[in-house]
Amino acid sequence: MGFFISDALAEAVPAAAQDPGFVGMILPVGIMAAFFFLFILPQQRKTKEHKKMVDALGKGSEVVTSGGLLGRVIDLDDNFVELELADNVHVHVQRNAVVSLLPKGTFKARKKA
């Protein structure tokens, strides 16, 4: 077999290079920590703030849904919220579909325009 390719003879590798030990774990642990602080922790914080906002909903709150509907909360229960979009136009949406609370008077100002 050595006709076209010369045989490679391996030299002995020092024992320290064979077993990385603790030093070899620094990079993977550092990458996992970076992912935790850059992706997982902010998402948990955002989820907690959204849950707190949804729990604080009450009658008369002015909200925007994930579909872009702007309305005033008329009635709510554990899972659903009834929104008034215009005079005599009511829709039911899930509580989790509420994306943000608006300042008081926003709905009335949009209704006039």
Image: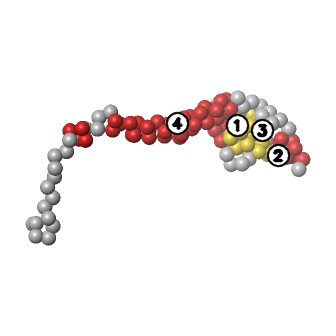
The answer to whether residue 82 shows anywhere in this view is no
Q: Of tags 4 and 2, which is closer to the observer?
A: 4
Q: Of tags 1 and 4, which is closer to the observer?
A: 4
Residue ID for mark 2:
86
Q: Of tags 3 and 2, which is closer to the observer?
A: 3
Residue at the location (78% across, 34% down)?
A: 61
Q: Nearer the viewer, residue 72 or 64?
A: 64
Residue ID for mark 4:
37
Q: Earlier in the sequence, mark 4 or mark 3?
A: 4
Image spot of residue 83 (x, y percent) = 75, 40
Identify the image quadrant of residue 6: bottom left
Secondary structure of residue under mark 2: strand
Secondary structure of residue under mark 4: helix
For this orientation, the residue located farthest to the bottom is 4
Position of residue 87 in the picture relative to residue 10 (left or right)? right
Q: Earlier in the sequence, mark 3 or mark 2?
A: 2
Inter-mark Cα distance, 4 to 3: 30 Å
Residue at the location (64% across, 32% down)?
A: 49
Residue ID for mark 1:
81
Kind of residue sitting beneath label 1: Val
Position of residue 20 in the picture relative to residue 63 (left or right)? left
Position of residue 84 in the picture relative to residue 46 (left or right)? right
Q: Of tags 4 and 3, which is closer to the observer?
A: 4
Residue ID for mark 3:
102
